[in-house]
Amino acid sequence: MTTYTAKDFSTDQDVRWCPGCGDYSILKQVQTVMPELGIPKEDIVFISGIGCSSRFPYYMNTYGMHSIHGRATAVATGLKSSRPELSVWIITGDGDSLSIGGNHLIHLLRRNLDVNIMLFNNEIYGLTKGQYSPTSQMGKLTKSSPMGVIDHPFNPLTLALGADATFIARTMDRDPKHLREILLRTHNHKGSSFLEIYQNCNVFNDGAFTIFTDKKSKALETVFLEHGKPIVFGEGNTKGLALDCLTPKVVDVEEYGIDNLWVHDETDLTKANLLARMFDGPLNGVQFPRPFGVFYAVNRPCYEDLMTAQIKNAKELKGEGDLDAILGGKNTWEVK
Amino acid sequence: MALLKDNKREKVTIIFAGDSGDGIQLTGFEFSNTTALFGNDLSTFPDFPAEIRAPQGTVSGVSGFKINFGSTEIFTPGGLADVLVAMNAAALKKNLSQLKKNSLIIANEAGFDARNLKLAGHIDAADPLKEQEAHHQVIKLDVTRLTREALKDSELSMKERDRSRNMFVLGFIYWLFHRELSHTEKFIAEKFKKNPEVANANITVLKAGYSYGITTESAYERINIEPASLPKGVYRNIVGNEGLSLGLVAAAQKSGLELFYGSYPITPATDILHHLARHKNFGVKTFQAEDEIAAATSVIGASFGGDLGITASSGPGIALKAEAIGLALMLELPMVIINVQRGGPSTGLPTKTEQADLFQAMYGRNGEAPLPVLAVSSPADSFSTAYEACKIAIEHMTPVMILSDGYIANGAEPWRFPKKADLEPIKTNFAKPIEEAYMPYKRDANGVRQWAIPGVAGLEHRLGGLEKEDITGNVSYEADNHEIMVKQRAAKVDNIANFIPLLKSDIEEGDLLILGWGSTYGSIKVAIDRLRSEGVLVGQAHLRHLNPFPKNLGEVLSKFKHVLIPEMNNGQLVQLIRAKYLVDAKGLNKIKGMPFLADEIVAGAMAVIKE
C-alpha cells in the first residue's frame, strides 16, 4: 500500500478562510492524521453541509461533497448505507448540525452509522457575518441579538448522548496534539463518532474559548479525560474530580488521596452524562473545569451492517432476485 | 330493473361501498383479480376517506371501490355505475348520484337499521331502500344473519365472525357474475395461513354467499360478461404503485446498479416503499428516512456512491425535497424523483387525485433548474415510465421527475408484462482511471459528464452545490462561466428530446386535437370514441414526456384547427403549450379530487368546436 504524507491530502485549491481562523489548524491536523489511518485515499470521503467549516472537503484530496445546509449527515447516511466499506467524514458547524440539520444529526446518531462527525463549534454564524447560533451563550450580543441572546444554548454533547450516540468526544483547535489524538480515536471507533471541536472564529466571536486555551487559565478551566485513569487537572495535576455517590465534586488530590478519585470509564453512560453536564455553569454550586477527550465510547450494531445483513439474509431465504418472476407475479393469464 | 335472465352485457361498472372498516377495498381488489384472471379487461378506482377509521356509519366514513370490466377494451373505471353494493345506509346515500337509471342495488339489510339510518342522516323514518325500489332493482341480503348462520359451528367470537361479512357479499357477487371462487379461496388461505380458523371462516362465508345465489336463483338474474379480446400475450393485474416499483427494480437489474430507495411515508406514495422493501433479495436498499429532506439527500449520497438513487413522495414532500433536487441537478448525478400527486395545495386532499404539481415539477426549484419530467398515464403504463425515467437519469446524468397520481397509484388494470430480456439496455457512464487528471465536468457530445465513484484511485474529486467551473468542476463565481454552465445544464436536458419517441396523434389532422398528460388518458380515449360516433373529426395525443417535449409536438398541434387540453388542475399544461407553441389551446379543467368522466370531456370538446 502507498504510504502517504500530509501533503498528499492537500488540493490545489486556495484555502479561503479568514486569516487566523481556527479552521486552518483543524485542516492541518486532519491532513497530518490521514496517513496514519492506513486507508487508501480513494476510499475516504469528506461530506459537508453549508457554513465556513463546510468548505473543508474542497481542501482534502479525497472524494468529497459540499452538500446543502444541514444535510451532510443525511447525504452521508445514504453514502455509507450504499458503500459501507468507505471511510466517511462529516464536516459540520454548530448552525449546520444543531440548527437547520438538527433532525438528521439525532437520527444519524441513533442509527449509529459508522461515520465520523466533526462539529466545528464556534458559537456563531460566521459565513452570514455574525448572528447568534444554537450554541451561543445566553445574553450574547450579536448582530441579530443587539439586546442579548434569549435562546438557551444547546449542549452538543448531552444532545448527542440523548440521541444514544455511541461515541462522544471534545477537543479544540488550539491543542494540535490532543486534536490529532482524538481524531484517531474518532476514526477508530466503529459506529457514529461525534466529535465537538471548539473552534475560534477570530472575526465574529474571537476569544469564545480563550479561557480553555490561554496558558494562564487552561490548567484550572480544563480537564483532560483518559480512560481508566483518575480525573485530575490544575497546575501539576493537583486537583481532581471525585464522586459523592453520583454528585461530582472538585477535590485537592493530595488531601483526598489519588486512589479515591473518580476514575474515568468511557463505557459508563451515567458518568458520561455527568461529565457532559460540566458545561452549563456551576453544577450544584460548584464550578467545574470543562472536560476534553473521549467522554463515552461503546459498541452497538451499525445501521449499514444491519442493512447489508438483511439483504444477505433475504437472498439466502428467497434466492437471488429473479426479475421475470416478479414481473409476472403470482396470477397470470394468457390471451391467445 | 328489467334484467334479462342470464343477461349478457359488454361491460359493467360496480361500486362496492361501506364503512372504512368493512373490508371494502379488499373485497373490490379480490373481485378485480378474479375478474382479471377470468379474462375481462378492467379498470379500478378506490375512493377512501383520509381517516383510517372515520366515524362509523356516517357518509364521510364511506369507503368505495369502483370497477369497470368488460369483454371490450376498458379505459376508465367507468362513469355512472350499473351495480351498487351498499353495506350500509351511508354507502347508499353517498353513491346514489353515481348510479345509472334502473341499476341494481345490493344492500346489506343490517346496515339499514334505525341506527344506521340516523348516522347516515336520514331524519325522516322513510326507508331509503323502499324509495329506491321505484327507480332500481333492489336485492336485500341479510348479510349479518346469513354470515352468523354459516359460522354457527365456528369457535370464533361473534365479533370475529362478523368480520367475514364482506366475504358473503363477495361470494354472492361471484355467483351473480359467473365467477369462480378458487382464486379468492387461495388468497384467503395464504393471507390467514397463521390463523387457519379465520381462513376457514372466511372461505365458509364466501361459499355461503355463492350458495345463497344458487338456492335463491329464481329470484335474481345473473349477468354474463364474456372474456375480452385483448392483444395476444400473457397478462397480470397491476396497481400503479406496484408497476412503478417493478420498473425501478428492473432498471437497477438491467443497468447493473444497486437500487437505493430513500423515502418518508406519505399518502398516496407510501406503497412504493412497501413494495420495494419486499425485494431485498434483489439487493434493494430501502431507507425510511426521518423526513422528506433526508429521503432526498440520502439518495444523493447513495448516487454519489454509485447506486441508482430513487425517492418518492407526494406534493408536500416534493416541496421539501426541492433544495436537494437542485443539488442533484448541480452535481449532475442520476436520481429519480417520483411525485404521486394528490389534491393540493398544502396538505390538501391526501386521498384524492389531482394533476396540479406539473408546474412544481417544471419550476419548483431556485435558480435555472430544468430537469426531465415524465408522466404516467395508467397503471399499466407505470412500469415502462419508471423504467424510462431511470434510463434517462443514468444515461444523461440528471435528476428526473416522474408524475403519477392517486388515481393511477391505487387503480388497477391488466398489464401485458415484459420479459427481462426484452427490456432496452441501460448504459452506465462510469469514469475510468486515466493518465491525466479527472475533469468532473468534461462533457461528451450529448453534454453528459462522467460518473466517478469513491473507491476508484485517481478519480478523487470534490462536488458541491456552489457553481462549478466548466470542465474542472472547481468552485467558480466567474460571471461568464455561470452563464455557460446554466446554458449547458439546460442544453443537456433539451438534448434528451433526441432520445425520446416522437408524439403520435391517432389521426394525423382534424378539427380538434385533445391533448392530455397523465391519468386523463382513459377518459379522453372514451370521450374520443363518443365524439367520433357523433361525427366529430377529433384526434387524441397523449404526452408522457413533459420536459423536454417530443420534438414534433409543435407540428402535431399545427395539424388541428382546435386544441383542447383536459387537466385535473386549474390549467397548467395548457399554459406551457400556449407559451411555447403560440397556439390558442383551450383548457378543460376539473379540480374535484376525482378523475374526469368521459362525458365531461365530450361536453368540453363540443363547446370548443361550436365556438
Image (spheres, rainbow, N blue to C red):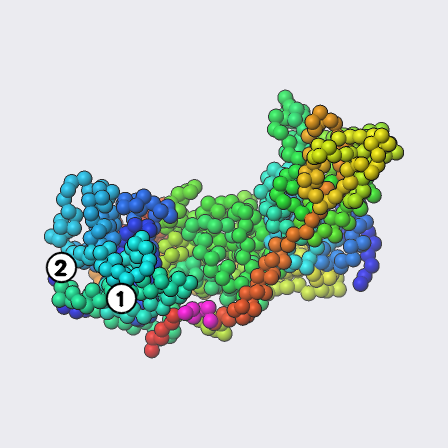
Label 2 and label 1: CA atoms lie apart by: 27 Å
Q: Are marks 2 and 1 on the same chain?
A: yes
Name the residue beneath numbered marker 2: B1
Residue farthest right in this picture: A236
State left or right for residue B260 relative to residue B207: right
Residue B45 falls in which quadrant of the image? bottom left
Residue A65 on image: x %, y %: 66, 50
Instruction: Pinpoint residue B324: horizontal percent, then vertical percent.
Output: 56, 48
Q: Residue at x 26, y 69 (%)?
A: B179
Residue identified by numbered label 1: B207
Q: Main secondary structure of the magenta part?
A: helix
Residue at image x 50%, y 74%?
B421
- Residue A174 to residue A331: above or below: above
Q: Answer few, some or many: residues within 10 Å of disc 1's Cα (few below 14, many 20 plus, some between 14 and 19).
A: many
Residue A207 percent coordinates (x, y): 76, 30
Residues A208 and B52: in front is B52
Chain bearing mark 1:
B
- Whether residue B210 is visible, yes or no, is yes
Q: Type of residue at label 1? A: Lys
Q: Which image quarter is the C terminus of chain A in?
A: bottom left
The magenta segment: A325-330
